[in-house]
């Protein structure tokens, strides 16, 4: 199934490019942004790997979890690729201070769960400084972390509560869903003058896809249509956009033509692309790995009910994780995760099939 580029963001796919993994697209984009702007620096835990005791040269690090920064310290030095102590509140605060004084720091928070340790810095300083100073200052700060279950990392390393971040005025939140979008969104985030949180789902890390060689940015706050359809709208974000595409393929075998919307950005939220789709299909299923209470799925349901209610032929349906922590047991974790079968069955009930 090919991507629909009628709602094109950045360059199309008729350009020179390379098929690569999500993690390599992420690493390459960090490298490109470090080369593009000398004010860009990266700070986080285990991202530069320390020094050889004899030569005093930086070692070839793991580059943090999933090798996001691997190889960068050798080319850019420890002044720009900085290891931090296990103190998220401390180094996020330091990064905010650096951003306020003109640098463009990128913060690796490892796992999404660790965001909570730095929450006061995000809520009170990163997101509010520009507002409190009457727009006289900028906070060009980018943060990223690995989210989501399904990989055996258990309850404390598998959260997907991006809805909490999207609730904060002044903080932008984006959710790439493939190698193409992570390059465009990460580049746009680093060049943006406001704080941006890039959510990287762990299940996408080794996903392969086409990435154009040329420099491009995807506009923050805009979604995209991955597949056009007429019978039902499936809305996904991050990995659940992949789930929606898998479900759409299954539905197609039953002659059900699903439209798939990939949000890409949770704050700002592209309400228009969702509403326009619902006006066409008259039905919607929102697929969200977050817990259901006060989730992005709930927000989309509220937006559609408020602004497109007259176009609905059936209630808005949500497919989410249950309201529990992520289990460690493999069997239970598989049951916990929303998948394409869950979406398929929900659509069948929605269409009374």
Image (cartoon, rainbow, N blue to C red):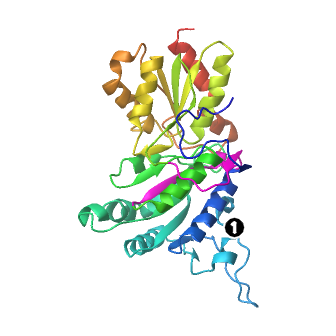
Relative horizontal placement of residue 134, taking residue 196 as reference (left or right): left
Quadrant in which the N terminus appears: top right
**For residue 253, what is the image quadrant?**
top right
**For residue 77, what is the image quadrant?**
bottom right
Relative horizontal placement of residue 24, taking residue 39 as reference (left or right): right
Residue in the foreground of this view, choosing between 142 and 295: 142
**For residue 337, what is the image quadrant?**
top right
Q: Residue furthest top?
A: 353
Relative horizontal placement of residue 332, taking residue 274 as reference (left or right): right
Would you name the residue on which mark 1 appears? 70
Residue 106 higher or lower than 333, as above or below: below
Q: Position of residue 84 (x, y in %)?
A: 55, 75
Q: Is residue 183 visible?
A: yes
Q: Which residues are magenta?
A: 194-218
Residue 84 higher or lower than 163, as above or below: below
Q: Is residue 157 visible?
A: no
Q: What secondary structure is found at the residue carrying circle 1? A: loop
Residue at (41, 70) in percent of width and height: 96
Residue 214 located within the stretch drawn in magenta: yes
């Amino acid at each position: 199934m090919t991507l629909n580029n009628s709602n094109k963001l950045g360059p199309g796919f008729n350009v020179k490019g390379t098929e690569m993994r999500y993690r390599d697209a992420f690493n390459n984009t960090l490298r490109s942004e470090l080369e593009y702007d000398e004010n860009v620096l990266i700070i986080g835990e285990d991202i530069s790997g320390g020094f050889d005791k004899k030569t005093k040269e930086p070692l070839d690090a793991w580059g943090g979890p999933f090798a996001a920064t691997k190889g960068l310290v050798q080319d850019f030095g420890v002044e720009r690729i900085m290891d931090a102590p296990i103190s998220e509140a401390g180094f996020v605060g330091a990064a905010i201070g650096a951003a306020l004084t003109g640098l463009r720091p990128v913060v690796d928070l490892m796992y999404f769960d660790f965001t909570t340790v730095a929450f006061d810095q995000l809520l009170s300083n990163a997101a509010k400084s520009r507002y409190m100073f009457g727009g006289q200052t900028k906070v060009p700060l980018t943060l990223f972390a690995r989210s989501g279950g399904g990989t055996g990392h258990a309850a404390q390393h598998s959260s997907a509560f991006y809805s909490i971040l999207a609730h904060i005025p002044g903080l932008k939140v984006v959710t790439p869903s493939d190698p193409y979008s992570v390059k465009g969104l990460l580049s746009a985030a680093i060049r943006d003058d406001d704080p941006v949180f890039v959510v990287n789902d762990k299940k996408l890390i080794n996903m392969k896809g086409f990435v154009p060689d040329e420099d491009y940015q995807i506009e923050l706050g805009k979604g995209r249509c991955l597949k056009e359809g007429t019978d039902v709208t499936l809305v996904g974000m991050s990995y659940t956009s992949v789930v929606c595409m898998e479900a759409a393929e299954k539905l197609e075998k039953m002659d059900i033509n699903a439209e798939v919307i990939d949000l890409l950005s949770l704050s700002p939220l592209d309400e228009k692309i969702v509403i326009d789709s619902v006006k066409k299909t008259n039905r919607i299923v929102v697929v969200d790995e977050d817990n259901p209470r006060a989730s992005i799925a709930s927000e989309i349901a509220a937006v559609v009910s408020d602004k497109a209610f007259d176009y609905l032929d059936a209630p808005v349906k949500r497919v989410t994780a249950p309201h529990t922590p992520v289990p460690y047991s493999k069997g239970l974790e598989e049951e916990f995760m929303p998948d394409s079968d869950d979406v398929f069955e929900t659509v069948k009930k929605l269409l009374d099939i």
